Image (spheres, rainbow, N blue to C red):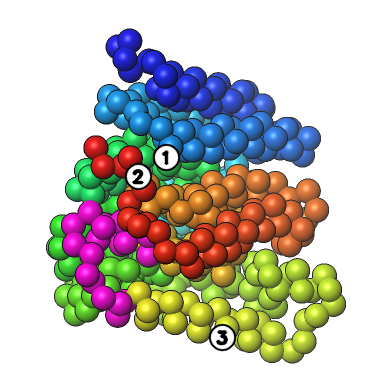
Amino acid sequence: MIRILAGPSRRLAALGILLAGINLGALALHVPGADTVGSPARANAFVAVVTVGLAVYLLAVRLVLRERLPRAAVWMILGLAVAMRAALVPAPPFLSSDIYRYVWDGQVQAAGINPYRYIPADPALEPLRDPAIYPLINRKDYAHTIYPPAAQGVFAAVGQVSRGVTGMKLAMLGFEAMGVLAMLAVLRRAGLPLERILIYAWNPLALWSFACDGHVDAVAVGLLGVALLARTRRRDGLAGALLAAATLVKVLPLAVAPAFVRGGRLWRPVLAGIAVIIVLYLPYLGVGRGVLGFAGSYGTEEGYDTGAGYWLLAGLGHLGFSPPGLVRAYLLCAGLALAALALRIAFGRNDRPGTADAVALCRDAGILAALATCAASPHYAWYYPWLTLPAVVAPLPAVIWLGAAPLLLLIDPFDDRFLWPVLVFVPGLVLAARAAWQARRPRPAALLPQGTAR
């Protein structure tokens, strides 16, 4: 015990306790009974507090990556991660109301109704309305559900045992725990320190997104973690199936697919993924094209059709540069850039056996995930914490920053898609450019930093 609490371990424990205290302080800002933080002033104070927590988290990440820690330190890391989540689970969701739609969709399916068939306000669903869930559903008067079939399967399963948000939160945390355990196994196979799990487990954005608000992105985190583990064990078909399921929770995980087929390992994961997609969609096809739900209208609502929803195009708009066809040009350029990188990764040589292969897989997955997410530039913070999952094995600074810093996006004091998000995207671009510059200078054992083999 004395050895565990000495030196770097003691500093790490102090940072963990400080982070937990900051989260509790932020939670105390919530007005009991309010379905938001309480007021704009409280929301600003909340983000100021959690930003301090972000700084503490980044210090902890730096310590884990630079210092040698006893193996038992991983239990302290996991224990504090569980404790911080346990403190947030009882709190009502107040940063987002999405979880109420999850519970509603689960109850609709428990009643034997296709969740894509009706909007919540449809008279056909009136018998299902209750005072705890229905009044808090967002877009209930005009939007069909937007969530893909894998997410709906989880909602349906939870709906069989729980009718409240706490049960849904616990289910999300169960998937998140599955992802953490999978990444611990990947770290072990790669011969890397297990303490690196802190990069995901202490990410304050993951804490608030999943333990407080119960976002379905946690399901994608769990499936992606197990998919990465399956790929490192050369279970290519299983990896492809799991990645396809993750994509039918949130579409963005599809971006990492090229990392899974690197070295010509193509047909088995592709065929398995297609089979999973077909199987998951089959139960819901009775509504025809309605199975796509609110997806098309969502893009319009978020400004993607005009370009206002994309961070870079919003910035160009401030400069008065918004010619016709700009959105198409942006999507074409972003698509070509991602496709070029995807082809380079997918058809690159797979000559890194063992440890380095796992690191290369997670490095490529992290780069692809970060680029795709930044190209889409969603202004909802909970779209980003999944980026830190592959960073556990391949800790790229830009990816870690982009997976945690969007805590700042919980508010937008300027009501503008460009000005405030600059605080997230510009540092991420600087870190990425710095890494690219450093990569031009060959270093021995670049994939395995010194002191990691223990």
**Image quadrant containing the N terminus:** top left
Please identify the quarter of the rendering in which residue 165 is found.
Answer: top left
Q: Are marks 2 and 3 in contact (CB under 8 Å)?
A: no
Q: Is 203 left, or right, of 43 in this rendering?
A: left
**Image quadrant containing the C terminus:** top left
Q: What residue does disc 2 label?
A: 450
Is residue 361 located in the magenta-colored stretch of the structure? yes
Mark 2 to mark 3: distance in Å?
40 Å
Q: Secondary structure at mark 3?
A: helix
Q: Are marks 3 and 1 in contact (CB under 8 Å)?
A: no
Q: Secondary structure at mark 1?
A: helix
The x, y position of residue 200, in whole percent, is: 41, 42
- Camera-side mark, 2 or 3: 2
Residue at 77% in and 58% down: 419
Packing grade of label 3 (10 A; few <14, some 14-19, many >=20) is few
Q: Is 204 left, or right, of 201 in this rendering?
A: right
Q: What residue does disc 3 label?
A: 332
Q: Nearer the viewer, residue 439 or 294?
A: 439
Residue 183 seen in the current view: yes
Q: Is 264 left, or right, of 298 in this rendering?
A: left
Q: Nearer the viewer, residue 282 or 404?
A: 404
Q: What residue does disc 1 label?
A: 65
Is residue 134 located in the magenta-colored stretch of the structure? no
> Which stretch is magenta?
346-364
Please identify the quarter of the rendering in which residue 451 is found.
Answer: top left
Mark 3 to mark 1: distance in Å?
38 Å
